[in-house]
């Protein structure tokens, strides 16, 4: 349309209403009248009079047409001349002397008015996911854009918002701000409301003992949550298997479809407890019949602890092999030193606690107790030969065979000497001959005797020594009260300080020294106390039988009855040594 022609054509029609006496020109009057008929920020009706490549000219009844870009039309391809449209008048004349109009704003205002008049907060409205923005998605509500926060898209976390773009959904209007003309919507609330209705309906359908299908929704350390089609149930780890599992992911994975049994329903809290193992019979019900005490079973090692190994005999039934039941002869401190996870082992059933769901197994019981075999092979009194493998303060351990040791206590090392420490007689690595004194297969103890390999010289001491006999020996120990002399048959005799010389002796060391060979006369034999008293001064010719008796009584009086000479000599000898150290310092 030619705007100038149109203006000129309309001018005569206006002239009949103009006062000729007025000084106002026709053009001014035309412009004034035309402008007064229009108001900005309003919606006006128009007609498309020309369609161009980049947009359309719209006649709104003004002296010039307005222009609308093609992008503002929803279906530009279908637009044609003659179509009527409502547009928003932004300005009466722009820089191009044309009215500034907008189709989008007019559509928005009409849509906004329609939505806000027909829908309020809490209403349900359809919309299309348009595009992503920071924090959520813009929704097209038939011309009005609304904001859908990311937290309101779905019930659970959304991994990829792009999966929702271009799709139409129902939304709940959460907030309408008239001043800012924005709307906030939620899809999640509708889903939760729908799910709540389905949950209530589903809970009514459920019954304890039912088997229902579900999908593993989430896995935790204590169990798994199963979606039963609108209701989540908890499958606790203890209800997954009759056997032992360390973590639920050993049996389940997210997204897996499984069948579970309803164990309990809390209608008030809408909680459902589920079971997986309850679908099968409890294997512990028949465990006593299937695995009698004393029978041999085969199983796989499924777990190892420091104190033992757990063996799966069948699905849901495990037994424990304690470290104490792994070897007859070796001291096992760690079960992992004997067996490993995954290993197939044979064991003997030792005990069954059906209520506690415990089975005690023995690995060593697969072979005969070697201690019992040894007791048959070496009855008490038998002689064995072995090597000293270990020493303690109270005895020496000698290997007999098959890693079985017997112990020689210090009290069984010598008939004649008081042994305070076994290293006085033996050392590690020595080959020794010993006598079996006792074997206790249950306690796994063998007592050995070293002195029992020889005849006790004190048994017939009266045949070896008599009062008045002159004997020879070596000084082996010096104490404050005398000197110990090693005689034949490894018997020690004591020369009391009073029996060294007729003259008074202040210190034994002044007259005798270690290793010195001496002669003495036997003056006392106490078979019960295993003591032999010696006298050097009794060697003199004028020493008669009465003198021998008196000397023996004198020595007996000097020693406490029942006190071992070895203990006495060690105690006094140490005290004497300490005194010498003090004097010499």
Image (spheres, grey):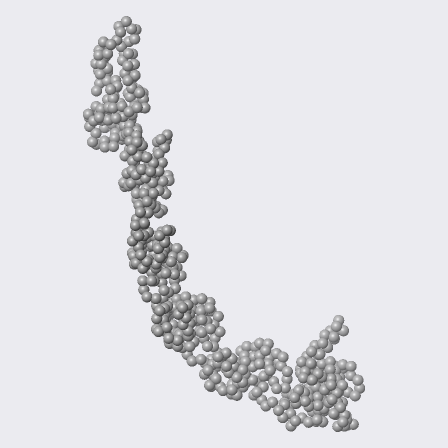
Answer yes or no: is residue 467 visible.
yes
Picture residue at 56% right of the left edge, 84% below the top: 449
Compared with 410, 526 (above or below) is below
Name the quadrant of the N terminus: top left
* Residue 24 spot, x, y in % from top left: 30, 8
Asked whether 160 or 52 is in front, the reply is 160
* Residue 453 spot, x, y in % from top left: 56, 88
Name of the residue lying farthest toward the right = 503
Picture residue at 37% right of the left edge, 43% below the top: 151
Picture residue at 30% right of the left edge, 43% below the top: 164
Q: Quadrant of residue 166?
A: top left
Compared with 112, 230 (above or below) is below
Name the quadrant of the C terminus: bottom right
Q: Quadrant of residue 69?
A: top left
Q: Quadrant of residue 454?
A: bottom right
Decide if residue 142 is on the left or right side of residue 432.
left
Name of the residue lying farthest toward the top = 21
* Residue 353 spot, x, y in % from top left: 41, 70
Compared with 61, 372 (above or below) is below
Picture residue at 30% right of the left edge, 48% below the top: 198
* Number of numbered markers: 0
Decide if residue 578 is on the left or right side of residue 135.
right
Answer yes or no: is residue 108 visible.
no
């Amino acid at each position: 349309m030619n705007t100038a022609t149109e203006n000129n054509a309309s001018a005569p029609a206006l002239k009949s209403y103009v006062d000729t006496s007025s000084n106002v020109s026709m053009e001014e009057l035309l412009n004034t009248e035309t402008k007064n008929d229009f108001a900005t920020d309003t919606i006006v009706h128009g007609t498309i009079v020309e369609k161009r490549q980049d947009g359309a000219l719209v006649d709104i009844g003004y002296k010039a047409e307005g222009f609308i870009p093609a992008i503002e039309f929803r279906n530009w391809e279908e637009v044609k001349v003659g179509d009527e449209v409502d547009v928003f008048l932004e300005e009466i004349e722009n820089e191009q002397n044309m009215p500034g109009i907008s189709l989008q704003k007019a559509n928005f205002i009409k849509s906004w008015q329609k939505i806000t008049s027909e829908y309020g907060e809490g209403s349900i409205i359809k919309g299309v996911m348009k595009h992503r923005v920071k924090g959520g998605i813009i929704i097209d509500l038939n011309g009005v854009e609304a904001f859908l926060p990311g937290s309101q898209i779905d019930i659970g976390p959304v991994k990829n918002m792009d999966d929702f773009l271009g799709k139409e959904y129902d939304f709940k209007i959460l907030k309408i701000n008239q001043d800012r003309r924005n709307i906030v919507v939620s899809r999640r609330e509708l889903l939760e409301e729908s799910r709540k209705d389905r949950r209530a309906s589903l809970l009514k359908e459920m019954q304890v003992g039912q088997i229902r299908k579900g999908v593993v929704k989430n896995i935790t350390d204590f169990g798994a949550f199963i979606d039963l089609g609108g209701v989540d149930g908890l499958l606790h780890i203890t209800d997954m298997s009759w056997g032992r599992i360390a973590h639920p992911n050993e049996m389940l994975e997210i997204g897996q479809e499984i069948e579970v049994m309803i164990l309990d329903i809390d209608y008030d809290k809408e909680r459902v407890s589920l079971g997986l193992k309850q679908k099968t019979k409890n294997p512990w019900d028949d465990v006593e019949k299937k695995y009698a005490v004393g029978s041999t079973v085969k199983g796989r090692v499924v777990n190892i602890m420091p104190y033992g190994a757990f063996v799966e005999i069948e699905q849901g039934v495990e037994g424990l092999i304690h470290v104490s039941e792994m070897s007859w002869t070796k001291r096992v401190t760690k079960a992992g030193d004997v067996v490993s996870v995954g290993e197939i082992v044979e064991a003997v059933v030792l005990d069954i606690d059906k209520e506690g769901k415990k089975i005690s197994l023995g690995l060593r019981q697969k072979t005969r107790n070697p201690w019992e075999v040894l007791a048959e092979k070496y009855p008490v009194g038998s002689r064995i030969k072995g090597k000293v493998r270990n020493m303690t303060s109270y005895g020496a351990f000698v290997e007999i065979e098959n890693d079985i040791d017997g112990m020689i206590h210090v009290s069984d090392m010598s008939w004649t000497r008081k042994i305070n420490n076994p290293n006085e007689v033996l050392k590690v690595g020595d080959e020794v001959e010993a006598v079996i004194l006792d074997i206790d297969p249950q306690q796994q103890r063998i007592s050995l005797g070293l002195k029992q390999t020889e005849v006790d010289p004190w048994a017939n001491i009266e045949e070896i020594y008599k009062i008045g006999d002159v004997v020879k020996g070596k000084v082996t120990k010096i104490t404050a009260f005398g000197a110990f002399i090693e005689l034949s048959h490894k018997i020690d005799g004591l020369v009391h300080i009073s029996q060294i010389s007729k003259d008074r002796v202040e210190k034994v060391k002044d007259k005798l020294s270690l290793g010195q060979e001496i002669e003495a006369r036997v003056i006392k034999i106490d078979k019960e106390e295993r003591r032999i008293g010696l006298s050097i001064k009794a060697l003199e010719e004028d020493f008669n039988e009465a003198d021998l008796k008196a000397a023996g009584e004198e020595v007996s009086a000097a020693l406490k009855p029942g006190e071992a000479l070895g203990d006495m000599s060690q105690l006094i000898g140490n005290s004497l040594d300490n005194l010498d150290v003090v004097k010499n310092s």
